[in-house]
Structures are given as C-alpha cells and as structure tokens.
Image (cartoon, rainbow, N blue to C red):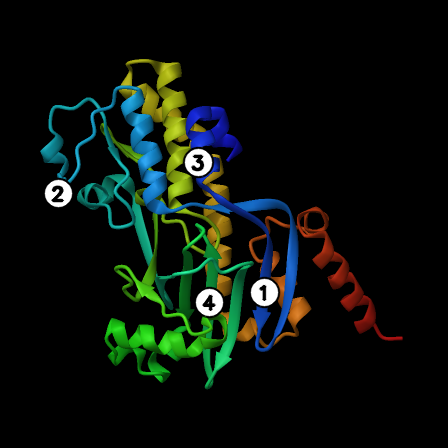
Amino acid sequence: MKEIEDTDPDVYEKMTASMRFTQEQKIHLNGEEFRIEYGSAAGAISRLRLLQILAAGCRDVGVNLHFETPVDSADDLDGYDLIVASDGANSRLRQEREVEFGTERRILGNRFAWYGVARPMEPMALIFRTFEEGTFIGHYYAYSDAMSTFVTECDERTWYKFGLDRMTDDERKAEMERVFAPELMGERLIANHSIWRQFPAVTNEHFYSGNIVLLGDSQRVAHFSIGSGTRLAMEDAAALHQAFQECEQDVAAALARFEHIRRPGRQKFGEAARLSFEWYEEVARHMQQPLVPFIHDFLTRTGRINEERLRAYAPGFYDAYQSFRDSARPQ
C-alpha cells in the first residue's frame, strides 16, 4: 500500500477507504488453533470495487477504456507504439512469443478453487485439516461487511482418494461444505466461476519482446499462498511508468529500463513464491508436527522471515514458540 500511495495518492485514498483491515489471523491444525496478532494490518477489497477505482483513475488522466473487446493476437494491435500484455496467467499475447520471452511452466499437484461466503468471516484464518484420511486446506478472509473469500485446496493424493476427479464442480462444492462445516456454520459456499484447477507456475526469462511488455501474472504467475498477481501487476505498472518518465518517448530504452528496475524484486519474490508452493505441495508431511512448530514452519517457509523479523512480525507467536522450544529441551 505504501508503494501505491507513493505512486498515486488519490487511488491510494480511495482504495483504503474501501478496504477491510485486520491484524489477526487464526491458524487451525486438526482441532487446535492459535490466534496470531501481527505487527501490521492486512487489507482486502472487493475485486469489483478495485476495478471501479482503477477505471476512474484511468479516466481522470485521459485514458480511453474499451470493454468487451477481446484481443486474441498482437496482430489485433498492429500499429501501436507499445502493447502492455497484462492478460493474466493464460496470456494469449505471451503464448504467441514464448520462445522470445523464454517461457517455462510447471504444473503443481495440489488442486484448488475459490468461493465466497455471504458473511464477514473474522478473523481471517488458515485451516489445515485431515478429514477422512484426506488433506484439506481452507483459507478465508472478509473483504466487505457482507462477503468473504473462501479458498479450498487439497493435495493430489486426496484429489483422487475422494473421487474429486470424477465429480462435477457442484459436487465438489458440496464436498467442501462438508469438510469445512465447522467454519461455515450452516452457510453455503458461493460459486463464481469456481473451477477446480492446478496452479501453473509460469515464469519468463525476458520481460519484453519487441514492443510487447509483460506485467503481472502474464510475466510470472504469483502463487496465491504468498501474494496477489494484482498487487505485482500494479507494482509492475508503477515501474513501467517510472521507466517512461526517465526515457520519455524511447520505447526500446524504456522497456530495457523497466526490466532493469523490476528484475531484482521479481526474482526475489519469485523465489519466495517457489519455496511457498513447494511447502504446500508437501503439506501433509508438515501437518504431522505439533501446532506451534507447524506454525513456525509455515511462517518461515519462504526464507523471508528469520527469527529477528518474526519477533517484530508476530511478537505473541514468537514468545509462544520460544516457550515451546524451552519446554522441549532435555532437562
């Protein structure tokens, strides 16, 4: 949010006014849970409201917006000076030039789907549950006074063991309502294109090819366990703006400058994302630990949080972990 404030204070003010903030998170592991009070707040916003704010920001600076106009190929945009391909993980513009971009992809084993719930579920929570010998994860958070997001996930063994591969999406939703019945408390999951899928870990060696530049998930898909593709796309856009301020009308120079600005942060974030999704791919093994060391393992899985940072990031949990370690030492 600080980067957005520095880039566009007006958009920042409208976003923060529409966000729901919390500093507390519940982590639940097979009947036990710990509530973590973080040192800073996390915020969530309705996707529709965010798009409305960004569209208004575009109009304020004279950008002409066109909706319901699919772009299937870069040929559809022939003659433009610059093409910003921020068209997501399945970017069609990137797929046309995968050799030039140096695209690599890896399909993960875990399956997941995004749902909604018609009430604010607080505090935000991560549920790690062994249910009828299957391994399930639920992640929910409120983003308005009336709605929450509820992400469900299972490992590959569970996907086949429960016959989820043979179910319809409606049947899978019903199964998740059964698995997470204690959290839903009678509420139904709300589907919105809630298709069960595997995560595509897509990376690109180069950020641009010719006059086409990749932003957000089209450049490197951000795993949902660590960060938002939307957030990264906005940071990419700010860096692209900076590059053109420095290079003015020289598109080739600006794109080279953009890649120079963004590569270090993107690589660092990408490595953290890889460590995070690999942790989730082995989640059943991690769940064999007691609650407190499991949470410590989870919080430090990316390598971005060491013991010193953990003390500032989640002081109450840090103290609980130190007490656990002290009690586990041989006398």
Residue 158: give x, y in percent of width and height.
40, 79
Along the horizontal axis of the image, is 267 left or right of 313? left
Q: Is mark 4 on a helix, strand or loop?
A: strand
Q: What residue type is labelled 2?
A: Asp
| Labels 4 and 3 touching (C-beta < 8 A) | no
- Disc 3 target residue: 15
| Labels 3 and 1 touching (C-beta < 8 A) | no
| Labels 3 and 2 touching (C-beta < 8 A) | no
| Residue at mark 1 to residue at mark 4: CA–CA distance | 10 Å
| Residue at mark 3 to residue at mark 1: CA–CA distance | 27 Å
Question: Sequence-wise, which precedes: disc 1 or disc 2?
Answer: 1
- Please report the residue visible at 47 percent of the width from the left and 54 percent of the height from the top: 142
Residue 314: give x, y in percent of width and height.
68, 52
Residue 108: give x, y in percent of width and height.
37, 64
Q: What residue type is labelled 3?
A: Met
- Disc 2 target residue: 72
Foreground label between 3 and 2? 3
Q: Which amino acid does label 4 sit on?
A: Gly
Q: Determine which quarter of the picture holds residue 14.
A: top left
Question: Sequence-wise, which precedes: disc 1 or disc 4?
Answer: 1
Question: Sequence-wise, which precedes: disc 4 or disc 3?
Answer: 3
| Residue at mark 4 to residue at mark 3: CA–CA distance | 26 Å
- Disc 1 target residue: 27
Q: Which residue lies furthest to the bottom in this view?
A: 132
Quadrant placement of the C terminus: bottom right
Foreground label between 1 and 2? 1
Q: Which amino acid does label 1 sit on?
A: Ile
Question: Sequence-wise, which precedes: disc 3 or disc 2?
Answer: 3
Q: Determine which quarter of the picture holds residue 239.
A: top left
Foreground label between 4 and 3? 3
Q: In the rendered image of this protein, does residue 68 appear above or below residue 240?
A: below
Q: Is mark 3 on a helix, strand or loop?
A: helix
